[in-house]
Image (cartoon, rainbow, N blue to C red):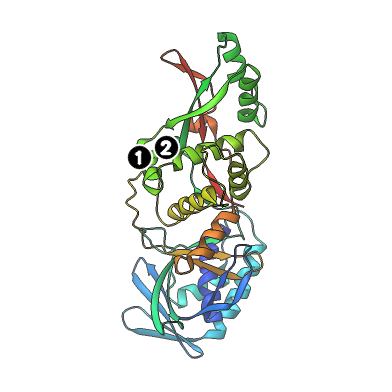
């Protein structure tokens, strides 16, 4: 018996649904289907423990091939299984199994909920690009709204930003009081208390040099921009990437020449989000070369599936920009959010974690 959560079952749902639909629609920044931009699906490739299995569309049939042709199943069967599976996913919680769906999975050589992968790619789809009259194999990571909110950038000590506290001369008792604040918004409240004592947070560097250099590779001032967005998150009621970027743009802390209304901050943040989505990780040296993943498939709450791909870069960037937010990670686990002293100066760390809305 196979058990999995909503997100894991969503990968099987995507396989069934896409084979039943026989085409892949793109979406806009607001997760609306763009009717005029779609790609006929030629086949879907899934990497199982026994090797690659291809689910090829041939008219009203799906030909399942694991090196040799093994099965021919009507497309409508996949549509029916998708409807059944969607209802089960919506009606379940935690980790669950679906015996009737598992029986069908077994019959089509689908042996696991998550395909075996060495990159961010969950599913590979060969589509027909009607604009250039050619087929293309595209890799996708699946983001499902049927389960919990997915993370774009996972928190870690690697994503800590270090700030020097200027104009700050606290007593040991005052430091103790600040660091012992344990409200629900304790990081914000600690910063507010620092400000009440005359202190200001000024970005110095990142805790992890690899992540810092990865950011510099994307844009030399990206660490400074993200540090301002992060500080804005922890000192305001703003949380979405879009609103935080708009706020930083209005303040313009890097003093860009705004006389011609260039969207400096938005442009650079979109590049950052895209690189994170397509392979950049804080702990690994980023060369700027995207891994096998080319974009995202979003499984909406109503079961509709939309694609965002580097093929349509503007739509992909807009989707990431509009649909992500900052989130406060565990300050204990990732060791941030406390005043500390080093070489006679006072410092404070803030942590960057980005999640889908």
In this view, which residue lies farthest toward the front? 259
- Does residue 9 appear in the picture of this structure? yes
Q: Is residue 47 above or below residue 355?
A: below
Reading the image, the residue beneath label 1 is 210
Which percent across, then down, holds residue 44?
43, 75
Mark 2 vs 1, N-terminal side: 2
Which percent across, then down, holds residue 244?
61, 44
**Identity of the residue drawn at 43% across and 54% down:** 275
**Identity of the residue drawn at 35% across and 78% down:** 66
- Element under disc 1: helix
Q: From the viewer's side, name the closer residue of 217 and 256.
A: 256
Pointer 1: residues within 10 angstroms few (<14), some, or many (20+)?
Answer: some
Which percent across, then down, holds residue 211?
39, 41
Q: Is residue 149 above or below residue 64?
A: above
Name the quadrant containing residue 125: bottom left
Q: From the viewer's side, name the closer residue of 280 and 196.
A: 196
Q: Is residue 75 above or below residue 303?
A: below
The reply to whether dot 2 and dot 1 touch (C-beta < 8 Å) is yes
**Residue 158 circle label:** 2
- Foreground mark, 2 or 1, reads 1
């Amino acid at each position: 018996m196979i058990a999995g959560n909503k997100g894991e079952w969503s990968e099987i749902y995507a396989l069934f649904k896409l084979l039943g639909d026989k085409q892949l629609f793109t979406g806009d920044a607001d997760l609306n289907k763009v009717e005029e931009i779609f790609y006929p699906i030629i086949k879907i490739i899934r990497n199982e423990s026994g090797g690659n299995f291809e689910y090829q569309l041939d008219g009203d049939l799906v030909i399942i091939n694991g090196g040799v042709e093994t099965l021919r199943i009507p497309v409508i069967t996949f549509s029916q299984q998708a409807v059944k599976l969607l209802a089960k996913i919506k009606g379940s919680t935690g980790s669950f199994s679906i015996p009737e769906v598992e029986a069908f999975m077994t019959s089509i050589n689908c042996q696991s909920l998550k395909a075996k992968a060495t990159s961010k790619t969950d599913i590979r789809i060969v589509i027909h690009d009607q604009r250039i009259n050619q087929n293309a194999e595209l890799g996708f990571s699946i983001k499902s709204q049927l389960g919990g909110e997915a993370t774009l950038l996972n928190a870690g000590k690697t994503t800590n930003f270090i700030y020097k506290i200027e104009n700050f001369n606290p007593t040991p008792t005052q430091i103790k009081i600040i660091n012992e604040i344990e409200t629900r918004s304790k990081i914000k409240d600690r910063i507010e208390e620092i400000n009440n004592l005359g202190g200001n947070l000024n970005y110095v560097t990142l805790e992890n040099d690899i992540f810092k250099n990865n950011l510099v590779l994307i844009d030399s001032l990206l660490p400074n921009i993200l540090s301002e967005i992060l500080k804005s998150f922890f000192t305001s009621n703003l949380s979405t990437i879009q609103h935080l970027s708009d706020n930083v743009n209005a303040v313009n802390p890097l003093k860009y020449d705004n006389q011609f209304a260039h969207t400096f901050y938005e442009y650079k943040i979109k590049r950052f989000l895209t690189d994170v989505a397509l392979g950049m990780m804080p702990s690994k040296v980023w060369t700027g070369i995207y891994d096998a993943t080319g974009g995202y498939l979003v499984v909406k709450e109503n079961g509709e599936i939309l694609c965002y791909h580097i093929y349509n870069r503007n739509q992909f960037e807009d989707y990431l920009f509009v649909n992500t937010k900052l989130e406060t990670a565990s300050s204990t686990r990732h060791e941030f959010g406390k005043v500390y002293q080093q070489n006679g100066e006072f410092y404070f760390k803030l942590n960057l974690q980005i999640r889908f809305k």
